[in-house]
Structures are given as C-alpha cells and as structure tokens.
Amino acid sequence: MGFVDSYITLTIFGVGLLLYVVGNAIYNIYFHPLSKFPGPKYLAVGRIPITLATLRGQKAQFRFNAHRKYGEIVRIASNELSFAHAQGWRDIYGTQAKLQMAKPASGIEEQEGAQSVVTAEGDTHVRQKRMLATMFTEKMLKEKESLFISHADLLVKRLAMLEGQPVALGDWYNFATFDMMSDLLFGESLGMLSNSEYVPWVRSIHGFLKAFAFITVLNEYLWFRVLWAFFPSKILNTLRETHFLFTSQKVEHYLQLDEKTRAGMMGHLLDGGSRKGLNLGELHTNAPILIFGGSETSATQLRSLSFLLFKNPEKLGKLISEIRSAYTSSDQITYDSLLEHTYLNACIEEGLRYYPPCSNGLPRVVPKGGTIICGEFVPGGTNVSVATYALFRSPKYFTQPDSFIPERWLRESEGGSPVFATDQKGIALPFSYGPHNCPGKKMGYFELRLILAKVLWHFNLKLLPEDDGAEDSWDNMRNYQTWSRRPLKVSAKPVRR
C-alpha cells in the first residue's frame, strides 16, 4: 500500500510539474506583457537559451543573429529585450532615463563595504566618476605623455630582439598596456615587457570575468539563488582574494611611500578628508577596474584591429604609408602629432565599430510602472540593454556593415566615399553612453594610436599561418565582458633605414 501511495504521489507531482511547465510556456509565449515583441517563440519560454549562450561566451553573436532576423527590438528571453536601435542609447542609458542598474547578486565584483564606479549609483557614483575623470583629461595625458611613450618604446625594443622568431603580438599588446596603467597609477610597471611574461593576476583576469559572468547569469534562477544562499561565503572569499589581493598589495605598498616623492596617480584619488575623492575602501575596489579598463580593453582592440589590417593588406599598406611618411624619427611620434593622422584614426574608429571591445551593453531593469524605449512601452521588471555588437553591424545604420572599411570615417576631401555619407556613425559608441560611460576614452584612443603607430613605423609585420584564421573564427570568439585573448602570431621584421 505504501508503494502504491508513493507511486500515486510521484505521478501527481510529475503531472503537476508538467502542467506548470507547459502552462508557463504558453503564458510566456502568448499572454506575457512582452509577447508583442518579435523573436523566436522558443526564446520567450524562459531563459535557458540566453543562459547557455552566455555560458559559452557567445551572447554577442546570439543577439547579433537574432537582430539580423527579427529587427531592432528582439525578445531574447521571457523577461528580456535586446535593442539594436539608435534611440536605445538615450532611452536606456541617458541622463533622463530612469532605468535601474541590474545588480548581480554575486558580490565578487567589489570589496566588501565599498562600491566601485561601475556599481555605484546616485551621489556616490557622481563623486567617484568626477574624481576619476580628472585622471584622463587631455592636460593629464600630455603631462604623462613621456610615460606612455617610454613603454611603447620598450615594446618596440623587445619586439626587435625577437627578429626571426614567431611573435605572439596579442600578448605583447597586453604586456605594454598593463605596464602603462600600472606605472600611471602606482609609479611602477608590472615588468611584463621586461620579463616577457604575464604576472599571475593579469593571466587570471579572464578566469575571473568568466566566473563573474557565470554567477551573474545563473543568479536569474531560483534554484541557484537558494544554493548560493547556503554556500557563497567560501566561494566569494576565494574569488575576492584571487581578484583583489594583487591590486590591494599594490595599493598598500603605494600608500606607504612618501607622499611628497611617490609617483603615480592613485594618491590623487584619495579624499584626504575632503569627501570629494575616494575613501580607502573605494580606492581598493576601483584599483583593479582602473588597471583592467585602461589596459585589457585597449589590448583587445589592438589585437582585433591588427588582425583586420592583416586581412585587408590594401588598408594596412595605406596606413603604413601615412605613418612612415610623416616621421623621420620615431621620437617625433607624439600625442599631438597622432591626432593629425586621418587614416590612422579612421582605422581605429572602424576597428571599434567592427569588434567593439565591450560587445554587450550594460544591463538595465525597467522600473515599476514601465517606460517608453525606442517608441515602445516596456513593462516594469524587464531586463533591457543595447546589443552593441549587433547595433554596430546593423545594415540599417551602416553601408556594407560586415566589411572593414576605414574610409567610411573620412570626408570626401580626405579620401572618403559618398557611398558612406548616409552611415549613422554617431551611434557607434564603444565607450558607452550617459552617466556610466567610460571616463578613460581619451586615454584609450591615445594608447591605440601610440602603440599602433610605433609598431607599424618600426616593423614589417606578417601574420603567420598558424594564426591566419578566417574572419568567421574571430567573429565567433568567446566574450565574457571582453573578447578572449588571441595570440596573433606574427613575424616582426625591423625596418632598416
């Protein structure tokens, strides 16, 4: 009798569960407030497809394919809309937008008790953003110009020593940008250019970003939140220690130096009791973000732009001609001179459009009561974001969007073509938009111009067969906030003058 009762109970439970799943799917597809938005029906059922795409590092490509088929606004999950629409920037991230930041409950992205400029909102964010912005003004960049140039010159020196050997140019871009940022912030580099190898913290960054992405996307599920409530402490502490220990030690060492003689910009950020700067906890929390934001994204862009130039030799030749004809000595390459190179800057803009370093827009949540986004009413509680990668490749806004064409950024008097006159280049915002946009935009452009110009002035580069992958292999790169690192194997032959 007990067996029969158990069987009946399990059967009732199973049937009930099946009815719930089927009923929930029918509701989500046909009766949910988001049912009016286009998208494949299977995506409307729940979040499993977008979760799997995120876990595989393919969310950007997933959204790109959805937008190509279904248009500018696509429902990519039961409670999520993706926007590849020009108005999306203003409506989702603009100053007047009332959307809330999607707060992942992972807790690993910041030190306990201190928010970063990425996670803070309101007055705390304004204060931090204003303080950090003072580090990246044109005046500051010119004052620190020699610091950036010295590391670019060391990169050139180290590459010259590898003549005749395969060079993982992508790694060397990382060495240069991380050394630059460490020197800028702490007054000393990480020594990666000198030692020709990653320090452990830099090598582990992508693992941290992957873990962060996993925890964030799985947090959408009740079963995960229940498990996380029981087992987070040890995991959180391990992840925090791994991620923050290195930069915390750098901060502590820096603060022990004599204030009057120490180099580096970190001391400039402290409030000193003024309540205008960062407190000590915020300094620790923002340190890895500052290093990462000013280095990994730049190195990622240098890597992808170099690949695009290798695959388009006519464009590469035109860029080399512009750079080498402008200087008789590498010492003449400066912040101001680089601003004058129209084709160099066009290549950089096109590279940022083609492979935006942050390919998925920052997630936001529509507040209670709903709001209008891109002319459509979106109910409260909906997750929304701009699909950066899909938007920048949209045929509605760009002519030949899947082709690398720097000339689209040039005026006709500069060699541009009227074919691209209708391109809406103003929507290509790789540094995001609104109060939470990247404050280091000017520095990022300087790093890209300087390193690319120095390398192309000094070397004839050739992509080696083992890394001469087709564009589609790069289009399918994994992405966990930034694109995965590709070695970009090349031969680098110094130019004899």
Image (cartoon, grey):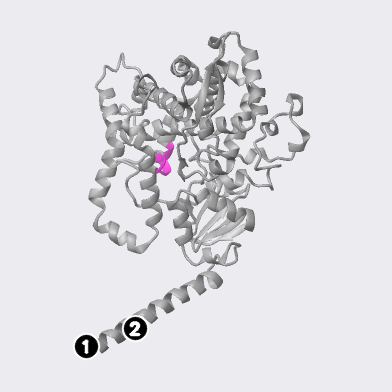
- Observer-nearest of 335 and 136: 335
Helix, strand or loop at disc 2?
A: helix
336 horizontally vs 218: left or right: right
Residue denoted by label 2: 11
Image quadrant in which the N terminus is located? bottom left
Relative vertical location of residue 51 with respect to residue 443 in this rendering, above or below? below
Residue 73 quadrant? bottom right
Magenta residue check for 127: no
Q: Residue at x 62, y 41 (%)?
A: 427
The residue closer to the viewer here, 113 or 6, is: 6
Q: Position of residue 183 (x, y in %)?
A: 38, 21
Q: Which residues are magenta?
A: 118-126
Position of 60 relative to 42 (above/below): above
CA distance for labels 2 and 1: 14 Å
Disc 2 marks which amino acid?
Thr
The numbered dot on residue 52 is none
